[in-house]
Amino acid sequence: MSDCDQDTSVPDWVIDHPEVLPVFERLGIDYSCGGKSLEYACNERGLDVRQVLGEINEAIRMSRKCDA
């Protein structure tokens, strides 16, 4: 669904998919974290990166559905 993955930096996620910003805000993930990977940011917050990726991909899917 997305070219981004757990190794992509959090700021790059926001640049490529701004619709995921509310997910990061809700989960307390710092999206201006100086280029840390999504996996690193999730580990810092004690979050399961697979679950977060699922929420991110859902936000992207819903955004695309609304654009169609």
Image (cartoon, helix red, strand yellow):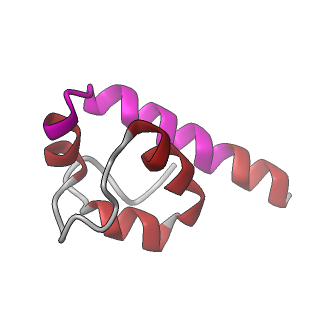
Residue 36 falls left or right of residue 55: left
Mainly helix, strand or loop, the magenta region? Answer: helix
Residue 21, x across and y down, in percent: 51, 56
Residue 22's x, y, as percent?
56, 50
Which residue is at a point 30% across and 55% down the rendered structure image?
30
Give the mark count.
Answer: 0
Decide whether residue 59 is among the magenta residues: yes
Q: Position of residue 27 (x, y in %)?
A: 41, 37
For the point 59% across and 37% down, which residue is it?
A: 58
Residue for point 86% across, 58% down:
68
Q: Is residue 51 magenta?
A: yes
Q: Residue at x 40, y 60 (%)?
A: 3
Q: Is residue 11 left or right of residue 26?
A: left
Which region shows up in magenta?
44-61
Q: Is residue 48 above or below residue 66?
A: above
Q: Hey, which quadrant is residue 36 in on the image?
A: bottom left
Relative horizontal placement of residue 53, taking residue 68 as reference (left or right): left
